[in-house]
């Protein structure tokens, strides 16, 4: 699509927004109900597209993409009136006989750029929040997840007119054309490299932006952890979607006294959850493409592998792989893995562990396994991260009442539920003043007497 065609779509959406149609809560509710019905009608096709792109089983597609998306829509339908209502705030004495309040207002024309790893969820969930807030949306899905992106375009095309929601397919050329446009808000989910470009273009045009990025999310396992439960939940979170999850545990950082027992338990859980031969398990996913397959394989150091790591390039399959004897200088620790490799690093003291984690970029998620509630809460308070779990992994994303987002290098801004509505809304401040009375002290001329009275009055 050419830059001019993209510009024409943006102008068409701007004109539609300016009619005021999206300000009507009844209109928003009708559109969200329509979207919900369209998704329900196409559940099998969505699951099939996700299987083709990422090898996801129907069950995994439902729990990790379709269900969460539908839950987001249900939340907005249930809470839209409350979220969109003006909020009263107290007025100081200087605003005697006035009412102060806030109004959530849509930004206008929003650009959403979504990634390939959860191509349906991370497109339509953000779209839901933007529509609930009263915006028009241009959605740019990933070219890597071609089947899901094409189906998403078909579903949204059946639901909405292009003047309200438009899907633009393509690669770098289309991304570049979109970033040149002066949207009212930009929402990006993806890599740090592209995130920097998005933020640069947003800064050039003074466009507010949300960045949902990633990072090396640590999984701290202390010496008093429940090893069997920890292993089960770590394996689930790490190897869901074949490790291609932005909040997956990137590495295990465990006390050296529990390392051997933990590795043994993790291996047992891999066999239990994905069978003895994961490459032949139809319920185990695949890598998105050969580029990412080759990148992940290059991070494997064979001499450090204690389990797994076999691969099939023709089917883009890599076994869950456990690596020990790694450290923070190892190649696998220099970038976010985003695949089914799980390095294990040990520490001797909590101070050492906290110091090492704090020396890295702020992660998107932090996971702590311990029976000591106070220690867990102390670690959560001390280590900056987007979010996280105590004695679990990734499940904080399942609570729609929790904001989801990064901090520092892992992102800026948040969404989901109420946070999503707020992200796509400008909170406008308003003072409504009575005409019945006026305080003359604020007006010129400012005499010595007025100055004295003002100081007395405003103390």
Image (cartoon, rainbow, N blue to C red):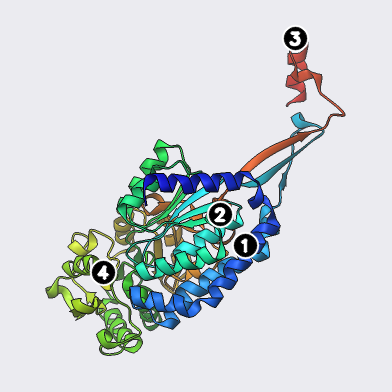
Q: Is residue 172 above or below residue 400?
A: above
Q: CA distance from mark 2 to mark 4?
A: 32 Å
Q: Which mark is residue 31?
A: 1
Pointer 1 with pointer 3, Cβ within 8 A: no
Which residue corresponds to mark 3? Answer: 447
**x and y percentages locating residue 98 in the rendered image:** 79, 35
- Which element carries disc 4, helix, strand or loop? loop
Q: CA distance from mark 1 to mark 3?
A: 59 Å
Q: Residues within 10 Å of mark 2 (few under 14, many from 20)?
A: many
Picture quarter with the C terminus:
top right
**x and y percentages locating residue 218 in the rendered image:** 34, 64
Q: Nearer the viewer, mark 3 or mark 2?
A: 2
Q: CA distance from mark 1 to mark 4?
A: 35 Å
Which residue appears at 21% of the width and 74% of the height? 323
One can see residue 243 in this view: yes
Q: CA distance from mark 2 to mark 1?
A: 10 Å
Q: Which mark is residue 164?
A: 2
Pointer 2 with pointer 1, Cβ within 8 A: yes
- Which element carries disc 3, helix, strand or loop? loop
Which residue corresponds to mark 4? Answer: 289
Q: Nearer the viewer, mark 1 or mark 4?
A: 1
Q: CA distance from mark 3 to mark 2?
A: 56 Å
The disc, 1 or 3, on the residue closer to the chain's N-terminal end is: 1
Q: Which mark is residue 443?
A: none
Q: Residues within 10 Å of mark 1 (few under 14, many from 20)?
A: some
Figure disc tally: 4
């Amino acid at each position: 699509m050419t830059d001019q065609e993209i510009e024409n779509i943006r102008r068409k959406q701007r004109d539609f927004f300016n009619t005021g149609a999206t300000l009507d809560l009844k209109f928003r509710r009708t559109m969200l109900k329509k979207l919900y019905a369209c998704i329900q009608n196409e559940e099998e096709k969505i699951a099939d597209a996700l299987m083709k792109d990422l090898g996801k089983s129907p069950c995994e597609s439902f729990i990790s993409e379709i269900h969460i998306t539908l839950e987001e829509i249900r939340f907005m339908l249930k809470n839209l009136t409350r979220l969109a209502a003006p909020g009263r705030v107290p007025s100081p004495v200087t605003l005697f006989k006035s009412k102060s309040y806030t109004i959530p207002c849509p930004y206008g024309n929003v650009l959403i750029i979504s990634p390939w790893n959860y191509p349906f969820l991370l497109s339509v969930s953000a779209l839901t929040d933007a529509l609930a807030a009263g915006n028009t949306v241009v959605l740019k899905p990933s070219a890597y997840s071609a089947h899901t992106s094409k189906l998403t375009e078909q579903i949204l095309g059946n639901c909405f007119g292009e003047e309200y929601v438009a899907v633009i397919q393509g690669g770098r050329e289309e991304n570049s054309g979109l970033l040149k446009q002066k949207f009212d808000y930009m929402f990006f989910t993806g890599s740090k490299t592209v995130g920097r470009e998005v933020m640069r273009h947003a800064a050039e045009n003074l466009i507010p932006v949300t960045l949902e990025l990633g990072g090396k999310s640590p999984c701290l396992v202390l010496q008093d952890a429940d090893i069997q439960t920890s292993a089960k939940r770590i394996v689930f979170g790490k190897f869901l979607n074949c490790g291609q999850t932005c909040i997956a545990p990137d590495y295990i950082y465990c006390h050296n006294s529990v390392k051997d027992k933990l590795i043994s338990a993790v291996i047992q859980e891999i066999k239990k959850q994905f069978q003895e031969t994961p490459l032949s398990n139809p319920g185990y996913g695949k890598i998105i493409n050969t580029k990412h397959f080759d990148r992940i394989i290059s991070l494997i150091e064979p001499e450090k592998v204690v389990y797994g790591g076999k691969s099939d390039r023709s089917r883009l399959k890599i076994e869950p792989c456990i690596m020990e004897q790694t450290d923070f200088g190892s190649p696998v620790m220099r970038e976010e893995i985003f695949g089914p490799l799980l390095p294990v690093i040990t520490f001797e003291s909590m101070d050492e562990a906290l110091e090492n984690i704090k020396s890295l970029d702020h992660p998107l998620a932090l996971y702590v396994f311990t029976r000591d509630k106070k220690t867990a809460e102390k670690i959560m308070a001390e280590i900056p991260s987007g979010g996280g779990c105590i004695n679990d992994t990734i499940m904080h994303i399942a609570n729609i009442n929790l904001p989801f987002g990064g901090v520092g290098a892992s992102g800026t801004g948040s969404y989901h539920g109420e946070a999503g509505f707020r992200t796509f809304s400008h909170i406008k401040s308003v003072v409504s003043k009575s005409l019945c009375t006026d305080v003359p002290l604020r007006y010129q001329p400012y005499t010595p007497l007025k100055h004295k009275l003002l100081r007395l009055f405003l103390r």
